[in-house]
Amino acid sequence: MSGLVLRAWLRDWRRRPLQRLLTLVGVIIGVAVVLAVDLANQSAQRAFDRSMDEVAGAATHQVLGPASGFDEAFYRDLRMAGWRDTAPIVEGPARLPDGTTIYVLGVDPLAEGPFRGTASDIGDAPVQRLVTEPGTILPPASWFRDSGPAHEARVTLEAAGGTREVTVIDRAAEREAPDAEEDRIAGGSLWVTDMATAQVLLDRLGRLDRIDVRLAEAEVDALRDALPAELELVPVESRGQAARELAQAFRINLTAMSLLALLIAAFLIYNTQTFAVLRRREVIASLRLVGVGRRAIFGVVLLEALLVGVIGTLLGALLGIALAQVLVAQVAQTVTDHFFAVAVTGVTPRPLALAAVFLLGVGLSLAAAMAPAWEAARTAGPGGSGRGGLERRARSWAAWLALVSLVLLLAGSGLIVTGAGALVGGFVALFLLIAGFVLLLPWVLVWTLRGLAVLVRGVTLPRIAVRSLERSLSRSAPATSALTLALAAAIGVAVMVGSFRGSVEQWLGQALTSDLYVVPAAPASARAGARLPQDWTADLVARSGAVSVSTGSSQEVVSDHGLVDLYVVRPHADWLEYLPLLEAEAPREPLGHRLATEDAVLVTEPFAAHHGVEPGDRLSLAVPGGQRAFEVPGIYRDYGNPSGTVLMTQAAFARGGVPPDGVGSFGLRLPDGANAEQAVEQLEAWLAEQDHAALVTRPGDIEQESMAIFDRTFAITHLLRVITLVVAFIAILGALIALQMERAREFATLRSLGLLPGGVRALVVLQGGVLGAFAALSAIPLGLGMGWLLIEVINREAFGWGMDLRLSWAEVGETVLLGVGAALLASVIPAWRMARMRLVPALRETP
Amino acid sequence: MEQQGSVEDAVLSLTDVAFAYPGEGEVLHGVDFELGAGERVAIVGESGSGKSTLLHLAAGLEAADRGEVHLAGEALAGLDEAARTRLRRARVGIVFQSFHLIPTLTVLENVMLPLELATKAGAAERRERAARQLAAVGLADKEARYPEALSGGEQQRVAIARALVHEPALILADEPTGNLDSRTGETVFALLLEQVRATGCSLLLVTHSHELARRLDRVLTMRDGILQAVDSAEAASA
Ligand SMILES: Nc1ncnc2c1ncn2[C@@H]1O[C@H](COP(=O)(O)OP(=O)(O)OP(=O)(O)O)[C@@H](O)[C@H]1O
Ligand SMILES: [Mg+2]
């Protein structure tokens, strides 16, 4: 008996393979997207953590000095004084000939033992050879795997010290070794060499960047007292605090995306699963009629939903892992751009993510199948409530949902107005508003369709199209909601990224006030640490005919807010006119005077946000001569450094002691009408004769490079946008197929009355178009609202970046077209199927 | 009783028509049948004998596997799907056992539908003609209702109005009273007959009721996949 019931239920798979397959596809895609985004997210976190661990190792504290490093003799003194658990480090980025950025870690192999065992993969490598053979370097194991047995024995590296060749130490043993999980994760951009080699590569002769130390709690003060004034003892955790926060913010944005994907996937799964059951109401009704118990029916529905859920989740997980590879590559690029991190290329799903995905795939499949099955099984015969009853209920539901949505919208707005909960509050508000808006949609859809029906009163076919959409609200509403959500996300992200991009571009235009820049020849990521001789100024003026020269150098200094980035400038006279000041205690003229003559600094907007600094506050900074307190008379806009920068004039910096020689860059202002080409040529000719490798760049080049990094950073959001759209497309395709199948009898009747196959196609496409247009138009307000929230609440809270809202109507229009296009495209298959439908079987179907 | 006439004169003619559903045995084995202009014919026969199938072939909803079907003088086999549809909507009105009204259109709109599909009549004229036809089946006061708010008998009266409104040459009716109780069935049947007479079109009616069948010009029996004239013994016993 139960075997026959099961057969009655499952035979639908053979009768309508396409529709049933769609049920499975819904689960697969939903699960895949959510899992892939989570994996990408997780890999960003791991890449970041590992990069921190590898570089810091097992140290508890670090001894740090000025940006240009400190004398290595100090390390000897320290060891002589009995501090044994110490390891000197020279470090910095470099670039391989193929453009890959690597991170060079110069160590003293003999002192390394206790520090970087497991985190990096130098544990078992032949590190002694680094000491015995000069000019050698130890690439990560993955490099050998990637380049194969035929790798070169010598590699050219481009770093702060110029372009040099080094000898690769072969790690034959490791190459053969199985692909250890640990090693695979470490990926590899950490190249280890000994200190002497690193000092040459990174232009640090006789100097160290830091000393790693392992201290017991009691020893900390003793060591601190033993340090000279220019050196600081910093706990490891405080390093990279800002970067950690930033990584957090990046992850939060990714999480927002993955939640959105989850929401859309949930729509998709719910839609396909309820349809799978609703479609077979007659089967349920007839089974009930011949006396099959409610529980037996429930059992088979449950069994099917479980099978679909489990199979779909498994396949979806596989697809998700594959998809994650694409996303991870994107994320790795972003992390490398911003944090010089090791790339994480292999990722394994977290148990928690798997549980969540399982809940989504299997749980939601079950829940979505249960509700309609319960309904159908409750009525003991055909007729009863039927589909018409269901749709009537759907319409009254729409009104209730609209009421709920009002509450959500109010709660969300309240959160924004009060600003409660900071970043988390911002996200909660965002989701309250999205949920509120989406729940309002069915109700709006009903009234829109009713209005349309009145509009096309005299024209029968459009009227049929519109009215049947309204009558199939349980189909059309979830599908439009999914599409609206995807399109709105597309608009929201476009507005956010577009505003951001525009603001950055504008800022670059303002910040780059010189006509030419002379910078060290080093990869962009290494430029911050590289230095040029200060005394070049006169020569540069002589060669270029510049009327004004500015210099700037950035360095990490210790402050009462932990390690912070300090940018020291000797600016052009009119610099403050170009600086995008957001808040200032004084007008520009006296402000400039104060910055030059008093202990005063400006901070960037992100700095103010991360450290809670306001105009009038004071900052304690380690400058030559020791720690001094600086007043903060103003805040300016800057997108250059997401963790924030402190801006100080050279005059203030040098007031207490002799600053280290060397500047990070020169800015040359040429006289009006000067020939820039010629100036560049003459500068380059002169630079070619100098010891320090340097090059001339123009603001345009810098802008281009910066915008390229910017675009890479946000490439992943574009990718996610495409993915959500694909999911929404499938949702609307499923809904349209369902809608048309349910209306097959009606279409057959129309055809028997003389409607041409082309008319049927037009009708179906019209329905798709109406749904698409509705979704696209509703997506505009929702999308703009999301964009505004992302800019004003989320990004401000997460990054501390303010930006001007920029609307690109072209992009909004594009998204609208995309939505309507997607819906029209989705209606092609059902239109084609309906037009070719065999009429007689369809006519026989019971209403 | 066979009426002689050329294929051109007949509204509908089937010559040696055979048909099988895909993957099934043959249902019709060679049906020969002709329906003259204004003629009213009933088909009876056992359930599953192929009566509905015959009507579907006549309407061009299915295509014959063998033999020829001529509708209003045109061979259906030579027409493509669109042309067959055009011919059907111009010449044929269909009444189904289960009404088949469009649930998303009002009663009046349902009746206007064939006019919109098959004629060039303007909106005002369509409305006026549909209203007149509705009045003729006694439903003038139910124009604005949706089908779900009508009784079965009323729904079938709307279906009759819809089948007749564009003045087709042929009405195909498949057990139009099959879903109605006998009294309502009788009323609806009488109405159908009256309207067919009034417009002078031909009628091919499938029914299980010999009593109703006898009220038409001719009664045929579907048996063993062919159409036979009712023999006198059967007629007498019915
Ligand atoms: N879609 C189909 N596929 C396969 N066989 C079919 C299909 N529709 C009908 N048949 C078969 O064709 C035969 C004729 O069916 P048809 O509906 O024409 O019978 P009928 O004379 O109208 O019966 P009833 O009086 O019960 O309506 C039946 O044996 C039926 O099983
Ligand atoms: Mg029949």
Image (cartoon, helix red, strand yellow):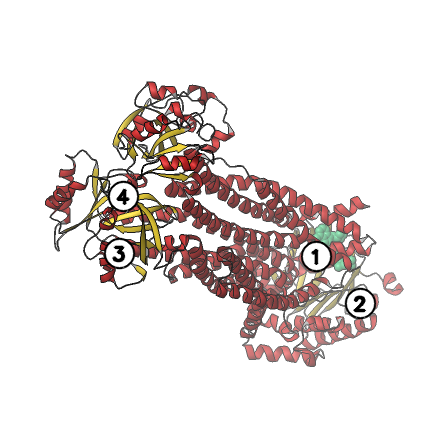
Q: Residue at x 65, y 70 (%)?
A: B169
* Same-subunit check for callouts 3 and 1: yes
Crowd tier of the residue under label 4, counting other residues whose Cα lies within 10 Å: few below 14, some 14–19, many 20 or above: some
Residue highlighted by disc 4: A625
Crowd tier of the residue under label 2, counting other residues whose Cα lies within 10 Å: few below 14, some 14–19, many 20 or above: many
Residue highlighted by disc 3: A510
State the SS at label 3. helix
The N terminus of chain B, quarter of image: bottom right
Q: CA distance from mark 4 to mark 3?
A: 33 Å
| Near-viewer residue (A560 or B207) | A560
Q: Quadrant of ligand 2?
A: bottom right
Position in image of residue A681 (x %, y %)? 14, 42
Residue highlighted by disc 2: B213
Q: Is residue A675 left or right of residue A582?
A: left
Q: CA distance from mark 4 to mark 1?
A: 77 Å
The amino acid at mark 1 is Pro
Q: Chain of mark 4?
A: A
Q: Residue furthest right?
A: B237
The amino acid at mark 4 is Gly
Q: CA distance from mark 4 to mark 2?
A: 118 Å
Residue B222 visible in the shown view: yes
* Same-subunit check for callouts 4 and 3: yes
Position in image of residue B174 (x %, y %)? 73, 64
- Picture quadrant of residue B43: bottom right
Position in image of residue A634 (x %, y %)? 31, 59
Question: What number is the disc on residue A372?
Answer: 1
- Picture quadrant of residue B153: bottom right
Q: Chain of mark 3?
A: A
Compared to residue B194, the image places residue A343 above or below, namely above
N-terminal-most mark, 4 or 3: 3
